[in-house]
Structure formats: C-alpha cells, structure tokens
Amino acid sequence: MKKARLILDNGMIFEGTSIGADNTLFCELVFNTSMTGYQEILTDPSYASQAIVMTYPEIGNTGINSFDFESNKIYARGLIVKNYCYNESHYLSNMTLSDFLIQNNVVGISGIDTRALTRILRSSGTVNCVMTTEQCTEKLIDELERYKLSKDIVLMTTRKSVQQIPASRNVKNPINLAVIDYGIKNNILRELSNLGCDLTVYPADVTAEEILNGGFDCVFLSNGPGDPADCVEQIKVVKKLVGKLPIFGICLGYQLLSIVLGAKTYKLKYGHRGGNHPVINLQTGKVFLTSQNHGYAVDTNSLNINITPTYKNLNDNTLEGFSCESQRIYAVQFHPEAAPGPVDANIIFNDWYHKMRLFKNKGLKKDSTEVIYTEVK
C-alpha cells in the first residue's frame, strides 16, 4: 500500500496509507464531527480548498451511492480518516469511497490518529497543510509557507450559468424565488422546490439589476466557502437588494447580509463543522440539533438596533441567526436542510415559506412586529 503524508504549516508531519489519488494538494485543514454523511460532506461546495479530518473513526463502510450528492463533484481537496473500510456493504453503494476519491483526483489518507490531530486543531486553531503521496521536501515546505486561500473562491465554486427549477409540487401562484449561488448545496434547492417555489438560480456574479428586473417575489442567498469579507462585489449586490425584496440567507448568505447591515464578521478558532451542534431559538426557548459547516461568525456586539438576534449556539454562545423586520430580512448561520445531519431545523424553511406567501398574497407592512419563525403546526 502506498504511503501518504499530511504536513502542517506548524512543521508537524503525519504519515498514513493512501486511499485516494496520487497527488499533492495544498489546503486548509478542518475537522468534522459527523458520524455519517461523508459523501454529502465531500461534495458540499462550502468545503472548497479544505482537507477534512473525520473525527468518527470508521469511514467508508457505506460506500458511495447515486443519491447523496450535494454537487456534481468533490469540492474538498483531501480526506483524513483513522480507519478506512475497504469492503463497503450498503445496498445502495455503487462505488467505494477510495475509487470516488481517485476519480476526483482527491488525496485521502487513512491510519492517522485523528483524535490527536483534532486536539491539535482545537488547541492551535485551523492550519494550512499539504497532503501528498510524494516525499516531503524543502520545496514542498516552502510552498506551504506561502500558501493562501484564494480570495476568489466563491467565483471558482459557483455555477457558470442560470438554471430554472420549477416547484416540485402543484401550488397555486407559487413563490417566484431568485437564488444566488455562492456554492449552494443540492438539498437546499430540493427543499425550496418541494415547498412550492419556482427557482431561478444565478451565478455569484449576477447583478442586482438583473434580479430586480426579474419580477421575483423574494431572494435567497446560499451557503458558500471562504471569508465573507472577501466577497466585495457580492456585498455590493446584496446592498442594492436590501429593502427592495424580502431576503433569506443561510451560512455565507447570512454573513453577507450581516455585513451589509453594518455588523462585523470574524474567523472562529476552528469553526463549526458537524451534525450535532445545539442551537436555541431566542424567541421560543426551543433547542434544535443542527448541521453546521462554517469557519466565520457574526460579532453579536456589532449588531445595530434594527437587527434582532434569533438563534444562539449553545456550545460557544455565538450568534446563529438574526432578523431585520424593517427590511424583511431573515437569516441563519446553520443548515436547516441538513444533508447530512438532523432534520430538527427543517421547520425554518416551512416558516419562511409561509411568511413569503404572506408578503406575496396579502402584503406586510415594513414596520410589522410579527415574530420571526413562528412555528407552523
């Protein structure tokens, strides 16, 4: 079996067995605490240019199937596991995880002490790394020292053309929804379509004028990779949309909305990535277990008086959601669509959809004091 190496920018080197492509890739190293769902995680565009450490020790036993794709390829650059299962056994599997990594030219390493590696990341914070099936050389170390994540990563991840997705259920007068793709997951599109929205999905470089002239009822801002502060042009577009149409944002979309509304974002020490993050609804006191994947957060202390905090992370008290009723803005940091993860928070999509129907069919005064995300029975 061929050896593979993980080299951290702090000088530490881990050696294991290659389970992926023969390649050398530079990336940011993060960890994910999910017990299942590695196929969805690998194909989530929010992981673009990252290598993922899976904290659950046994990975690969369910193989790869035709259904659990969050995009059309692997966006992560690497996968690190403790034990790789060479004999997958799930009845839907049509490919091994190893073959999937090789097919996508992604480096995979097994036999790494992922517990020790995760403890390093929790202690020192997220680090850059190089994953390679070649020998460790001085040249490789020098390149790693100079490596930086591209500021154009959203434009590298987004779709290249506009896509129309009709509502998947028969709804009278469906919501006409503009979706801006910063690296959107397939399950978000499925959830919105299943609710009864006609979707027009735009690349991240869409102009505000194109959306405002499209006859849309509202706008959805998707998840995506990278530092929200690097999305300079996307922030300008969102600023032009605010106040003109109702807007709902998830993950990166949430962060961009916060910046437009005057708040500040900052990089978390090691991020939130996994399917077991407890979040509390600050209006109702109800707690959800949520799926999360982000490395940045919104500074609660930077919110202006027009922004109402709606959700909080119970692990570290970071802000997980807000509303701005005067501008008809609603946003959450976590992933209500799960995939993978718990479906506790699916109700948020349902509540937002009913709120949009209220805007569309009856109208709602901008000074409404209606509580965001009142749960629909």
Image (cartoon, helix red, strand yellow):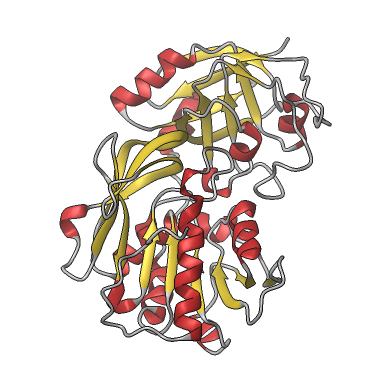
Which of 365 and 57 lies nearest the eye of the viewer?
365
Q: Position of residue 23 (x, y in %)?
A: 67, 29
Q: At 73% across and 9% down in the image, what residue appears? A: 1
Work out whether residue 278 can be spotted: yes
In which image quadrant can residue 15 be found?
top right
Q: Position of residue 334 (x, y in %)?
A: 42, 48
In which image quadrant can residue 96 be found?
top right
Q: At 33% across and 25% down in the image, what residue appears? A: 122
Q: Is residue 103 left or right of residue 78?
A: right
Q: Is residue 20 left or right of residue 154?
A: right
Q: Is residue 144 left or right of residue 181?
A: left
Q: At 75% across and 32% down in the image, what residue appears? A: 64
Q: Position of residue 286 (x, y in %)?
A: 33, 45
Total numbered labels: 0
Above/below status of 99 relative to 293 = above
Q: Position of residue 171 (x, y in %)?
A: 67, 74
Above/below status of 333 relative to 358 = above
Which of 349 and 73 lies nearest the eye of the viewer?
349
Work out whether residue 137 can be spotted: no
Which of 67 and 372 lies nearest the eye of the viewer?
372
Q: At 60% across and 57% down in the image, what residue appears? A: 191
